[in-house]
Image: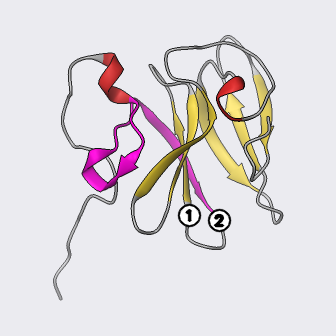
Amino acid sequence: MVNEVSTLAGYGGDDGEEEERCKDGEGINARFGQTNGITVDKDGNIFVADGHPNYCIRKVTPLGVVTTLAGSARRPGYKDGTGTDAQFDDPAGLAMDGDGNIFVADSHPNHCIRKVTPQGVV
C-alpha cells in the first residue's frame, strides 16, 4: 500500500506579497492566505475559511478550481451582502447544513456566527 499526499489547490510556499495570496484559479495557480477551516458539501466541493489577509469563504471544486464565494480580500469588517460585497474579519471554523448553507465562526473582533447561502448571500 502506498500513501500519497498531493495538493488539490493552492501553492505550498510563501508568495511574499499579500496581493498574491488571494487568487482564484485552478490547482496550484490558486492562492490562499490563512486556511482556518473547511467543510465539504454532498457534491464534494470543499469550502475554506480563508483568513488573513483574505477574509473570505472560498470554494474548491473536486477538480481543484478555486473561486471566492463570499467576502473580499484585504477588506476585513462586518457586512452582510452577496459575494464580494460581504465582509468577514476572521473567518475560522465552518459547518454545513443539509441545504448547503455554510455557517462561519467569524471570530475576533466580530464574535458571531454568520450564515452563507450556496449562492454566496451572507
Q: Residue at x 81, y 25 (%)?
A: 80
- Measuring from the top left, give residue 48's x and y in whole percent: 53, 45
Membership of 26 in magenta stretch? yes
Residue, far bottom: 1
What residue did someone put label 1 on?
A: 45
Give the Cα separation between the discs numbered 2 and 1. Answer: 5 Å
Viewer-proximal residue among 68 and 95 = 68
- Measuring from the top left, give residue 118's x and y in whole percent: 74, 53
Answer above or below: position of 121 versus 85. below
Viewer-proximal residue among 40 and 117 = 117
The residue segment tinted magenta is 22-40
Q: Residue at x 56, y 63 (%)?
A: 45
- Measuring from the top left, give residue 79's x and y in whole percent: 77, 18
Look at the numbered discs 2 and 1 and tell me whether their residues touch, using CB distance below 8 Å.
yes
Q: Secondary structure at mark 2?
A: loop
- Measuring from the top left, give residue 24's x and y in whole percent: 42, 42
Quadrant the N terminus occupies: bottom left
Answer above or below: position of 52 versus 9. above
The part of the image, by quadrant, that contains residue 105 is top right
Looking at the picture, which amino acid does disc 2 mark?
A: Asp
**Residue 87, numbered label:** none
Membership of 36 in magenta stretch? yes
Looking at the picture, which amino acid does disc 1 mark?
A: Asn
Q: Is residue 24 left or right of residue 75?
A: left
What residue did someone put label 2 on?
A: 41
Viewer-proximal residue among 36 and 75 = 75
